[in-house]
Structures are given as C-alpha cells and as structure tokens.
Image: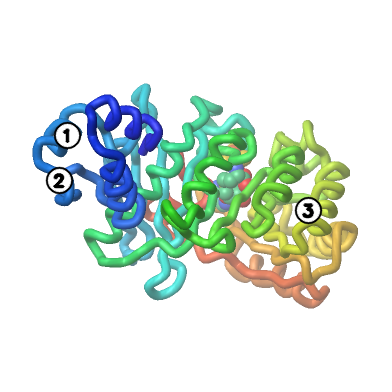
Amino acid sequence: MDLKKLAVFLKENGVPAFRLKQVREAVYKNYAATWDEIPVLPAPLRDKLVREFRIHSLDTLETQVSKKGDAIKFCFEIKGGLKIESVLLNLMPEKWSLCLSTQAGCPVRCPFCATGRKGLKRNLSPDEITDQFLAAAHYLKTTRQQKISSVIFMGMGEPFLNYDSLAEAIRTITDAELIGLGQRHVSVSTAGHVPGIRRFAQDFPQCNLAISLHAVDDKLRSDLVPLNNTYPLSQLVKALKDYITTTKRRVFVEYVMLEGINNSRSMAPKLNSWLRSVAAPKYFTVNLITYNRTGGPYRAPARERVAIFAELLGNLGVEVTIRKSLGDDIAGACGQLAGK
Ligand code: SAH
Ligand code: SF4
C-alpha cells in the first residue's frame, strides 16, 4: 500500500490524522485487504476509499495449492498488465515462508531458470514487493488462521538489480510499526551481484544472505549464471570475505544440481576448496537444490546422486542440506516461476 499517497489523500479530504494510523494497523498488522475489513472507519469515509483508493498495488489473478497442501502459489497482476508470482512454503509445521519476487522477469537469464528465459520486463516498486506479502498474509489468515514467519527473496528476479525497492520493502517488512518481522527472518538470494552484496552487508547485517553459486570455475559459472561475466568469481570471493568480516554471519550457498554438468564427484572437493578460500567452513551452509524442470535441455540427477554429492561435501567438513522441493506440481518450485 502506498502510505504516503494515502496520507496526502486523507489530508486533502479533511480526515483527521489518527485515521491514517488506524488504516496502517489494519493493513500491516491485521492484513485487511479491503476497506470493508476496516470497520473502525466511518462508513462515508470507507465508501469514498472503496471508490477512490486501492489498498494493494496488485490484483490476485489465481491462487494454486499443491497436492500436498504445502505450497501455495499466487499469480498477481501488476500495473501494465504484467504478471508476477509468489509462493508460500510450509517448510515446518505451522511455519510458512514466503518466497517474494523483486522483478517481473529477470535480466540475468540463467539458462536453467524459467524466470530468466523471458528477460526483464521491469523492476517492481517497493509496494509491489510488500503487497505480495500483504496479499499472501491475508490469504493465510482468512483460510487457515496462520501467519507468515519468514520471507525469502527467491522468487522472480535478481533482488540486487532492484536494490532500492528491495531495501524499502525489507524496511517495511521489518519495521515494528508496520509488518514487524525480525531481520533474521528475512533472506535474500543473489546470483552474485557484488555491489549489492556490499550494500546489503552495510544496510542489513542481521538479514540472511544466500548466493547462487552453482559452479566454482569461471567458464562453467558464466554459462550457468551469466552475471558471472560482470562479477567473476575473484570478485565474488572478495565481496563474500568482506561480507563475513562485516556481519560475522553465515552465508547460504545455493547449488542447483544439473545432471552431468556440475554434479560430478570431482566437483565436491573443488567446491570445498573454493569455500575455504573465502572463509572457514562454519561460515557456510551449502544448500543443494535438485534441478526443477523448466522445459530447458537440463536434467535432474537421481536422488542418490544428490545424496552422494552431499555426503562428499559433508565428509570434507562442509555443512550441507538438500532443499526440499515443494510445489513443483503447481510450477511453484525454485526456478519455475514464470508469471505466464
Ligand atoms: N535471482 C536470485 C533469486 C531467485 S532464484 C538468484 O538467482 O539467486 C532462486 C534460486 O532458484 C536460485 O538459487 C536459482 O539458481 C535457483 N533456480 C533457478 N532455476 C532453477 C531450477 N530450474 N531448478 C532449481 N533451482 C533453480
Ligand atoms: Fe534471474 Fe535468479 Fe533466475 Fe538467474 S536464477 S535468471 S538470477 S531469477
């Protein structure tokens, strides 16, 4: 919601200032999505707002629930008729994580990712990012009486290529007067945008950082993550070293397992050495993500192959997790968000 615009609107209509606070609380704390859900407002004001002021900057076009009920995908329409998606993931009982988009499309164009395939349509505004949260929170509240406990910026787009909107959205999500999630419950995943990593360390040292690494030699990484042509591994190493020195925080390293491309046994010790060239193993958790089908030429490794890679890394002293893939039946898993 555009609070500044609402403040001006209310003032121009001679509405006392305390009404703004009432709306703010109803929308950001109780996730009201329509004016009718804010009964403290006098009826004539509500009627006027219904006609003249939108609460959310996006419309929910479709809500899909996975068969197991552990993933819920929202397709939203934003200004200009563009479509973006967000996914609620039920990773632990009663705990929902919301995967948010920061761009419509993505300019990085990783060849295994459905979002990248179409290139960038445009950056999202801060409200378009935050309102994905408000709409999803409204849905969870009204359908299941549950709440979102963490936010991951792993939806459509490269968050650090839309840094200012991302930063404003994180402020809204973590501001105690607004949504009020703890910074520790916010994670940002980047394809390795070095200036973004540096700003993020300064601005949000309590939030979590995830790096989509996928390969530790420049040739392969540039094929998989073309942003590597701009910020090669040597620069990424330095940025991560500085990030860890500044924040003292553990970095999550994402590694999408593409059969025959980056998952051979010999790559595990190389990954281990690369991580150690940045910092001690205690500063990393490697998250292995089995490739989710996106219609490209890639294949997912068999489950055992992922387990072997994890074991090899584990034996080298690296903390490893294998990411549970939720929502692939509704094209809501990592890399599958396309916004149609
Ligand atoms: N642009 C950011 C965040 C969004 S992508 C980034 O790239 O980090 C979120 C994660 O999904 C990234 O780690 C990305 O590499 C991964 N991903 C993309 N396509 C995938 C696919 N088809 N299967 C599995 N993971 C994928
Ligand atoms: Fe963009 Fe991330 Fe997809 Fe790469 S993986 S195209 S950076 S959204």
Mark 1 neighbour density, 10 Å: few (under 14) some (14–19) many (20 or more): some
Whole-number angstrom distance, CA of label 2 to CA of label 1 = 8 Å
Residue type at mark 1: give it.
Answer: Val
Q: Which residue is mark 1?
A: 50
Secondary structure beneath dot 1 equals helix
Secondary structure beneath dot 3 equals helix
| Dot label at residue 36 | 2
Ligand 2, seen in the image, is in the quarter at: top right
Q: Of residues 217 and 50, which is closer to you in this image?
A: 50
User: Residue at image x 36%, y 38%?
Assistant: 1
Q: Which residue is mark 3?
A: 243
Estimate the x, y position of residue 110 in percent, counting from the top left.
63, 38
Answer whether labels 2 and 1 touch (C-beta < 8 Å). yes
Q: Of residues 12 and 242, which is closer to you in this image?
A: 12
Residue 236 visible in this rendered orientation of the protein: yes
Q: Quadrant of the C terminus?
A: top left
User: Residue at image x 53%, y 48%?
Assistant: 170
